[in-house]
Amino acid sequence: MRFGIAGAGFSGAVIARELAEAGHEVHVFDTRDHVAGNCHTERDPETGVMIHRYGPHIFHTGNERVWSYINRFGRMMPYNHRVRTTVGGRTYLLPVNLLTINQLFGTALRPDEARAFIDEQADHTIEEPANFEEQALKFMGRKLYDAFFHGYTRKQWGLPPTQIPASVLKRLPLRFSYEDSYFNHPYQAIPKDGYTAIVEGILDHPGIEVRLGTPFPLGERSRFDHSIWTGQLDAWFGHEFGHLRYRTLDFEEIRAKGDYLGCPVMNFGDIDVPYTRIAEHKHFAPWEEHEGTVCFREYSRLAEEGDIPYYPIRMTTDKTLLTRYLDAAREEPDVTFVGRLGTYRYLDMDVTIAEALTAADGILEAIDRSEPIAPFFVDA
Ligand SMILES: Cc1cc2nc3c(=O)[nH]c(=O)nc-3n(C[C@H](O)[C@H](O)[C@H](O)COP(=O)(O)OP(=O)(O)OC[C@H]3O[C@@H](n4cnc5c(N)ncnc54)[C@H](O)[C@@H]3O)c2cc1C
């Protein structure tokens, strides 16, 4: 069969490879002039630092299939992510752990003592939290919430946390140990030669043709027996029912000599600091040495026409609109919607790869059984 794929990020590339290996003809289009989508990396010509162009990307997974898949296409270097936060003129460790708690309260509590102490701080008058703020106050009380959650959340989402659903904070986001590794997964790594080299390797197959700087030819899609759409779900429908909303990021570059931050990522929780965090990219490759350094301040705002869509907003009104598009997608013939934009969800890279592999399996099984190919292979 002949497939057309919109998007050369992990979603599009992994599906392209699986289909090509099964003997199909695959045409991949991307509007950008590079592959790897938002995971794109490139060397800064001045310093030699590997830059994560659309924000820092750390690979972490517990999925064996995904871990062995990515290792087929490049060397993954062990990397343990650590994040700090500056708030009220002091610096603390994240995720909020025993040291963070003891520093904030000027205590020296052991784990069980800290649990009991946080339970005393928690606002037990809140029975049914109506929003993110109430959920956090019910879990941890005012002081921890104000220091580490209120300002950052407000800046990231551009909304008072009283307008964010309680479901965003599902469980107590505190650790009662001194463990400050940001992720818990057994495999945590960053590719030695960057993510773009990995995705180039995935797409390097005689059955795949890649056209960069070229939008998917929606008007001529009948050229393909089936299309895979990893672009924005509503864009497939010409935004017929309205635009699904996203947050976008503005990056402000800082160049310096030596070490600017002393860590890969520093968050800024104070509401009067307009950016959410600074990332120093040479710390994502601790096996390299560079004299110069490049950092980016991140500012979060609502995406407008022409902005890069980063984080789906998924508040109640967005979900209502999403339902209309999902219903329309289920009726659409000869197309499968995949990936973070195609399903309007935040997906980590490992989940993206896992879902792309599942989608490819589903497509190949449908072909084997001569059945129609489904529009989704995950619960979108
Ligand atoms: C700031 C930020 C930080 C992140 N950090 C991490 C992290 O640390 N760890 C982690 O695991 N994940 C992280 N992620 C998530 C990661 O970026 C995604 O998992 C991944 O990019 C999803 O791949 P994708 O192929 O679905 O989408 P994308 O990477 O967005 O690729 C989609 C591609 O489709 C192209 N496209 C869209 N429309 C069209 C069209 N009409 N025609 C042709 N091409 C089109 C786009 O140009 C894009 O290249 C982060 C995400 C963000 C926003």
Image: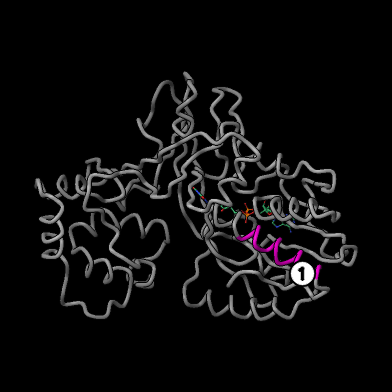
* Residue at 47% from the left image edge and 72% from the top image edge: 315
- In magenta stretch: residue 274: no
Q: Which quarter of the figure is the C terminus placed in?
A: bottom right
* Residue at 65% from the left image edge and 64% from the top image edge: 342
Query: Taking 171 as reference, is 58 above or below it?
Result: above
Report which residue position mark 1 lands on. 335
The spot of residue 317 in percent (x, y) is 51, 77
The spot of residue 355 in percent (x, y) is 61, 61
Tag 1's secondary structure? Answer: strand
Q: Which quarter of the figure is the N terminus placed in?
A: bottom right
- State the extent of the magenta-drawn residues as a range: 355-368
- Using residue 48 as the reference point, say whether residue 291 is left or right of it: left
User: How many neighbours does mark 1 have within 10 angstroms: few (below 14), some (14-19), or many (20 or more)?
Assistant: many
Task: Give the residue type at disc 1.
Answer: Val
- Using residue 95 as the reference point, say whether residue 317 is left or right of it: right
Q: How many circles with numbers are drawn on the protein?
A: 1
Query: Taking 119 as reference, is 294 above or below it?
Result: above
Query: Taking 67 as reference, is 283 above or below it?
Result: above
